Amino acid sequence: QQQQQHWKEGDRSLLIAYALQMLCGGGYLGLHHLYLDRPLQAFLWACSFGGFFGVGLLRDFFRLPHYAGVRNSSPQCEDSLATEMKYSKVPPWSLLRLLGCYMFGEWFCIVANLAGPEVFPSAYFVITSALGGALGVWLAGSACTHQGGSLKWTFLASLVTCTSGKSVHAGLVAFQWTRHWKPEATKQRPRRWQIVVAALVFWTTAIGGFIEHGSISLNVSEGKFETYKLKDCMWNVLRDIDFADLYTKFQSGPSFQDDDWGFRWQEKWDSFKGSLDVNGEKHALKTLEMDSFIGKAYTEDDVKQHFKRMAKQWHPDKVSPDKRAEAEKRMQDINEAKEILTGKLGRTGRGIDRSKGGSGGSGVG
C-alpha cells in the first residue's frame, strides 16, 4: 500500500525527463529512466550506449509521455492498464519487445563469455555465456512496462541448452512462456546506486575481457600480417613507451598549412604507429643491446651474436652471489628477447623496418 501511494504522488516532470535524455549524454546513461523510476531500463541503456547506439533513445523520444504517465499514475494510464488486465491474462505480445529481449540476451552473452582469464576451461565460458544471455533476456523483458517473467526458468532453459549454441533462444522462449502482468507500481526496484555499481561492473568486465581475450593483426612487412594478443601489445607499449619520441613524431612532418596535409597525415600516422612497440620488438632489441638495429633490418646471426654475449655476461653461474637474483631475471628477459626476434625472423625472413610504420595495427580480431 505504501508503494502504491508513492506512485500516486505524481512528482515526475515530463520536461525534466526530456532534458535528462537529450542534455550532456544523459540519455546514453539512462538518466531519464532513473528519474522515472525505471532502473532496469536505465541499466540496460547504460550498458548499450542508449539502447544499442541510440536506437532505444529514438524510441524513447516518442514513449516518454507514456512512461511519465505510468510513473505518475495518470487516470488514462490507470484505466488502460485495468482494461488490458481484465481482458488479457498476459501482457500483449510485441515484436519490438521480443527483438529487444533477444538483442540484449546476445549482448550480455558476448560480455559474459569474456568474464574470466583465458586459462579458465572452456566449460566455464560456456556456462557464463549462457547465464549472461539469460540475464540479458530477463532484464530486457522485465524492464518492459507492466510485464514480468520467471528468472529461474529463464536461467534453467539457457543452462540446459548451453552446449547447443542456442541458449539465448531457449531463455527467450522460457521468459515468453512465463510472462505475466506485473504493474509498475508493484515491482521491486534496486536502488539507484546499485544500478550505477552494476553498470560499472558490466563495463569493467566487458573492457577487461576484451583486453584479455582480444587480438590485433599487425602488418609486419610487405602486406604480411601477424596476430598478437591485445593484452601483450598493450603491455609492450606501456613498458617501453617513449613520450619524447612520440612528441617528435607528431611535431615533425606535415601541418595543416600544407596543401597536401590530408594525404601526408597518413605518413605521420604511420610514423607514430611505428614508434609504438606494439609487438615487443624494440624492447627485445634493447634487451640484447641491439639498439643500433632499431628501425633497421637484422639477421639471425646478429641475434645469436648479441644473445651469446649477453648470456655470457649475465649467466647466474658467472656473477657474484649477491647479484644472482638479478642475473636470473636478466637471463629470463634475454631468453624472451631472443625468442621474439628469432620467431619474427622465422616468419618474415628479416627484421621489421619500423621507418615504414610496419608495426601499425590493422584491426581487432
Image (tube, helix red, strand yellow):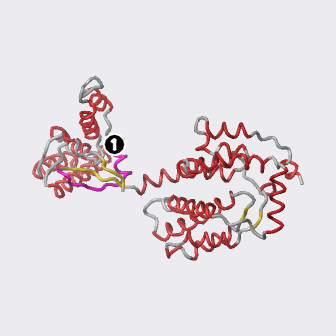
Viewer-closest of 292 and 183: 183
Give above or below for 185 relative to 131. Answer: above
Viewer-closest of 163 and 170: 170
Give above or below for 253 relative to 124. Answer: above
- Locate the N terminus by quadrant: bottom right
- The spot of residue 333 in percent (x, y) is 28, 49
Q: Which residue is mark 1?
A: 237
Secondary structure state at the residue bearing disc 1: helix
Q: Residue at x 56, y 71 (%)?
A: 169
Disc 1 marks a residue whose amino acid type is Val
Q: Residue at x 69, y 58 (%)?
A: 144
Is residue 120 found left or right of 253 in the rendered image? right
Residue range of the region highlighted in magenta in the rendering: 222-236
Is 83 a magenta residue? no
Quadrant of residue 16 within the rendered picture: top right
- The spot of residue 301 in percent (x, y) is 10, 51
Dot 1: few (<14), some (14–19), or many (≥20) neighbours within 10 Å? some
Is 230 a magenta residue? yes
Q: Residue furthest right?
A: 1
- The spot of residue 225 in percent (x, y) is 24, 54
- Locate the C terminus by quadrant: bottom left
Q: Residue at x 78, y 51 (%)?
A: 70
Q: Residue at x 66, y 38 (%)?
A: 20
Is residue 312 found left or right of 104 in the rendered image? left
- The spot of residue 352 in percent (x, y) is 18, 47
Is residue 172 found left or right of 71 in the rendered image? left
User: How many numbered markers are drawn?
Assistant: 1
